[in-house]
């Protein structure tokens, strides 16, 4: 994946990569025009809590842990059998930049603690002393390992997904989070215009959880959309951030040999990729992972599909799994380091980058890239390119314009399409999730709606949990603490 901060579009597009438009419009199921009536019924209440978090990905996990650490009775619903979402079940084991371009660690708090818990052999990335290095050879070496961009080394580690699952689970258990797996958040419970919990589907049928505050961490805004909250779903078809794919990993490879070949013989690598595209159609390069004998494939990225349409989701899964074995055949036959490769695992979770973006009180837009610090800051995100300052993320980016009782951290927060390209990443989901959990716990404790919690109190609690806030926001946190 490359970046291109300048161009004919005036710098609007930043991430460029191969985008494959493969959907056949004729395969999208036409409406039948028929319907069936479902009888009204009583829904059993499974649990009552202070904070309900729906979705156990990076944002939902962070929200649940942060809320529980503040003493809130917290229940986390997750449709799969693990925590971590795309960072684990989606095999997005490359954790994107957590540092600014000067090497300073920006994504801190629960995210930093989680990665610090991993064993040394479960995390691969530049040592701390190399963060921010512009030394050409060092940057070139780490660029091949997805940890240097624009000639600058960053803290962008690759993590073992199983260790990340285990550490996430332990932190949630230690905090006292009530975990409910194999439960799909289906509908919000709404009373007097406010969300008061959610209905979920499971092997026990439809059940409900009632809560003082609900956190929509579905990634797709499923709850707030079904509650009638405003949202945007526009995309730029030229960018990769609307694409989907199932990631996979091959074992039995020699990644140092492969990476050396890419660096030393770029013409041969380009020719290999050209032949692959000619033979396979959709063809992608291998990425380094947390081990030298495991290769990661985070594509091909398929465009033209909707992640909220079940037929599209099904087609992407079928296409991606077929492509995995066509890649295996080509790589084994022609690529140095892959002669002994074998299919190790395809991701149990589909890789979705974008569906909905919240209509929020204070969206993050391109205007925020000038270095301004919001007085309502809940965290600091690395920017897309060295020409931009770190980006202040305000509390209003996770607060719906009108809907009460709900917060929406993660990739479906309020922002424009370009800002979404980095705010959707795993570290930023940890950041906004932790803030949502803190705010939800404070709101539940005070018996008020989340928008009524003084931001200074949220900031003070975030600082106590190790999050990074800049001077303007930290001043508000200090005043609240006093």
Image (cartoon, rainbow, N blue to C red):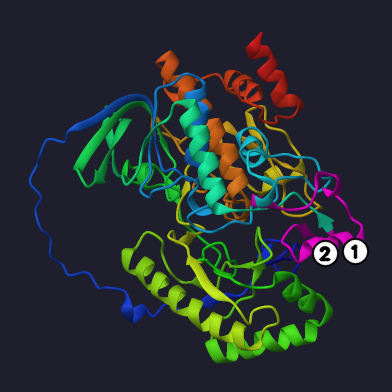
Which region of the structure is painted magenta?
Answer: 122-151
**Which SS class for mark 2?**
helix
Left or right? Give the position of 299 relative to 316: right
Left or right? Give the position of 197 relative to 420: left
Inter-mark Cα distance, 1 to 2: 6 Å
Q: Nearer the viewer, residue 262 or 2?
A: 262
Please identify the quarter of the rendering in which residue 463 is found. Answer: top right
Task: Give how far across and how far down residue 479 sits, in percent.
Answer: 68, 13
Determine whether label 1 and label 2 are within 8 Å by CB: yes
Task: Give how far across and how far down residue 130 sits, in percent.
Answer: 85, 49
Q: Nearer the viewer, residue 402 or 62?
A: 62
Task: Give how far across and how far down residue 70 sits, in percent.
Answer: 51, 20
Please identify the quarter of the rendering in which residue 23 is found. Answer: bottom left
**Which SS class for mark 1?**
helix
Q: Which residue is mark 1?
A: 137
When the figure is inspected, residue 5 is found, relative to residue 45, above or below; the finding is below
Task: Give how far across and how far down residue 62 sits, in percent.
Answer: 53, 36
The residue carrying pointer 2 sits among few (fewer than 14), some (14 to 19) or many (20 or more) residues within 10 Å by Cα, namely some
Please identify the quarter of the rendering in which residue 446 is found. Answer: top left
**What number is the disc on residue 141?**
2
Residue at figure coordinates x 52%, y 63% from the top left: 242
């Amino acid at each position: 994946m490359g970046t291109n901060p300048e161009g004919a579009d005036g710098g609007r597009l930043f991430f460029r990569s191969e985008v494959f438009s493969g959907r056949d419009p004729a395969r999208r199921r036409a409406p039948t025009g028929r319907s069936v009536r479902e009888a009204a019924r009583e829904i059993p209440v499974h649990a009552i809590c202070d904070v309900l978090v729906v979705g156990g990905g990076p944002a939902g996990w962070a929200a649940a842990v942060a809320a529980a650490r503040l003493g809130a009775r917290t229940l986390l619903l997750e449709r799969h059998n693990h925590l971590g979402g795309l960072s684990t079940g989606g095999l997005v084991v490359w954790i994107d930049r957590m540092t600014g371009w000067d090497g300073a660690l920006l994504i801190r708090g629960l995210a930093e603690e989680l990665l610090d818990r991993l064993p040394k052999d479960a995390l691969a990335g530049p040592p701390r002393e190399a963060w921010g290095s512009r030394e050409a050879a060092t940057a070139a070496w780490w660029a091949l390992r997805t940890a240097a961009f624009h000639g600058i080394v960053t803290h962008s580690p690759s993590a073992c997904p199983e260790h990340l699952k285990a550490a996430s689970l332990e932190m949630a258990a230690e905090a006292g989070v009530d975990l409910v797996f194999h439960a799909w958040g289906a509908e919000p419970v709404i009373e007097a215009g406010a969300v008061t919990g959610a209905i979920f589907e499971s092997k026990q049928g439809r059940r409900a959880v009632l809560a003082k505050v609900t956190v929509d961490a579905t990634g797709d805004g499923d709850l707030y959309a079904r509650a009638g909250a405003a949202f945007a779903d526009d995309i730029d078809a030229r960018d990769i951030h609307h694409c989907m794919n199932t990631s996979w990993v091959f074992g039995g490879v020699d990644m140092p040999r492969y990476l050396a070949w890419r660096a030393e013989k770029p013409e041969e690598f380009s020719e290999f990729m050209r032949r692959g595209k000619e033979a396979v159609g959709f063809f992608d390069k291998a990425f380094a992972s947390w081990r030298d004998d495991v290769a990661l494939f985070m594509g091909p990225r398929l465009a033209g599909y909707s992640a909220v349409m079940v037929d599209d989701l099904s087609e992407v899964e079928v296409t991606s799994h077929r492509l995995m074995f066509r890649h295996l055949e080509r790589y084994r036959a022609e690529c140095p380091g892959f002669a002994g490769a074998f299919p190790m695992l395809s991701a149990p979770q589909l890789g979705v980058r974008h569906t909905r973006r919240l209509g929020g009180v204070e969206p993050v837009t391109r205007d925020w890239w000038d270095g301004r610090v919001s007085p309502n800051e809940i965290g600091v995100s690395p920017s897309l390119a060295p020409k931009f300052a770190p980006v202040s993320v305000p509390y209003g980016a996770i607060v719906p314009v009108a809907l009460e009782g709900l917060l929406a951290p993660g990739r479906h927060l309020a922002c424009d399409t370009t800002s979404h390209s980095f705010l959707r990443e795993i570290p930023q989901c940890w950041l906004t999730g932790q803030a949502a959990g803190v705010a939800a716990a404070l709101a539940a404790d005070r018996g008020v709606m989340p928008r009524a919690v003084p931001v200074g109190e949220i900031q003070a609690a975030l600082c106590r949990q190790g999050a990074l806030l800049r001077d303007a926001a930290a001043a508000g946190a200090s005043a609240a603490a006093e």
